[in-house]
Image (cartoon, helix red, strand yellow):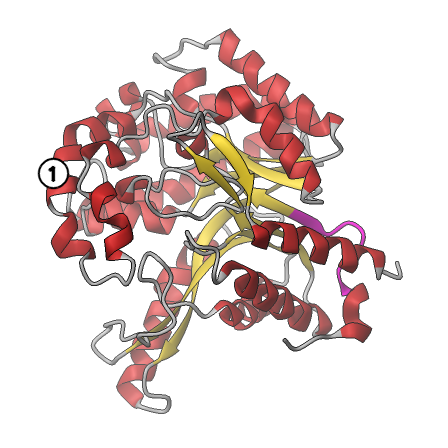
Amino acid sequence: MITTEKNNNLFKKKFLWGASTASHQVEGRTINQWSVWELENAHRLASKAYPKLKKLSNWEDIEKHVHNPSNYVSGEGVDHYNRFKEDFKLLEGLNFNSFRFGIEWSRIEPAKGKWNQDEINHYHEYIDELIKRDIKPIMNIWHWTMPVWFTDEGGFTKAKNLKYFEEFVKKITDEYGSKLEYIITLNEPNVYASCSYLTGVWPPQDKNLVKFVKVFYNLSRAHKKAYRIIKKANPSIKVGIANQVANIQAKRPHNLFDELSTKWMRYFWNWWFYERIRNYQDFVGMNYYFTDYYTGKIQKRNPEIPLSDTGWYMEPEGLYPIILRAWTRFKKPIIITENGVADSKDEYRQWWIDESILAMERALSEGVELDGYMHWSLLDNFEWDSGWWPKFGLIEVDRANDMKRTVRPSATYFAKRIKDLQLKRTD
């Protein structure tokens, strides 16, 4: 491993070392548009697993899971809703000083205009517990799930529905704003709009180019409205989004068509949404998982190795160039709001962490203002239409054995790296 011993002080005292989760993926017993869709589509997803996943190297390990409809139902989750104090104790033990979590709209406003005070109180207790442990809470308002009543009215396809999101933002700002330093309004609007309305593989499975454009644009409006509400109530809160970005490269460097394809994808996928909200973000939140190589036909042609459990090409060092591009374009503090790998046998995660830290050190050495890194995920969790078999967690969760938590060796290693980096600071 390449080391940068003399630069170990690049991660300043205020640097946010943390992990991420999302409410629907870990809490359990959520009732929203996604949980309804799961129950309606679990058997279909199980029946289509073989043609979709048969080429994965771990097929024999996952076969029995992916053919079982229960794999595609979030159900009890990993019971983080009830076990959050236990999970926060583990979080503490990993030397994290911050934690990104989701707040579930469908819990707080299960019916239009009807607020559930018990659930509001739950998230107060949740945030207070983090603060008590000196862990900075980073709230994510929207991570793809919505109350059924909202999607029944058309969700984000209709501009008139933005007023409902605004009311929700105002409510949680009034409730929790005084306790928060960071708020993420939207998670990966590019992924949600694409998967739900462009490819149509996610709920509501409405493959419609016009609706895709409307949703993508309306989400940018929703963020700007949320930004104004939050900043008016508490100007000191730092507000941003968590957009998925990729280190997009030409498959054949210097080939005119591949380069043009790459430039288009970089703008459309990485920068379009940020540009819409350029003056409405205090930091640039980035979720990084992919380095993708494009041909002139705007088709991905990635190397065949190394691949994660999900079959995604792994190039963690690609975090470095994407950080530099974001800094050059926006000149605002950057937070890596998600970054991780599906790795059930814990074979690659330590390497991934090392390469990610090195990429951040390189960026810091070039003057980038990088404020934090949130690993995905703290816990094994429900991975949307893939279900339960992908394992992203620093902490393994045995759902068949009373949700038993086990800290993976890579997480123990990461905790030591953080401690060493903090001890070698000079600030």
User: Toward which corner of the image does residue 235 lie, by quadrant?
Assistant: top right
Quarter of the rendering occupied by the N terminus: bottom right
Q: What is the magenta range? A: 10-17
Residue at the spot of label 1: 44
Quarter of the rendering occupied by the C terminus: bottom right
Please tell me whether residue 396 belongs to the stretch shown in magenta. Answer: no
Tell me if residue 140 can be seen. Answer: no
Q: Main secondary structure of the magenta part?
A: loop
Report the residue at 40% width, 34% height from top: 25
Report the residue at 71% width, 42% height from top: 97
Q: Position of residue 38 (x, y in %)?
A: 23, 31
Q: Is residue 3 left or right of residue 378?
A: right
Taking depth in this image into account, of 287 and 420 the one nearest to the observer is 420
User: Toward which corner of the image does residue 258 lie, by quadrant?
Assistant: bottom left
Q: Residue furthest bottom?
A: 254
Q: Is residue 127 left or right of residue 110?
A: right
Taking depth in this image into account, of 38 and 2 the one nearest to the observer is 2
Q: Residues within 10 Å of mark 1 (few under 14, many from 20)?
A: few
Q: Position of residue 164 (x, y in %)?
A: 39, 23
Report the residue at 38% width, 41% height from top: 219
Q: Position of residue 269 (x, y in %)?
A: 36, 61
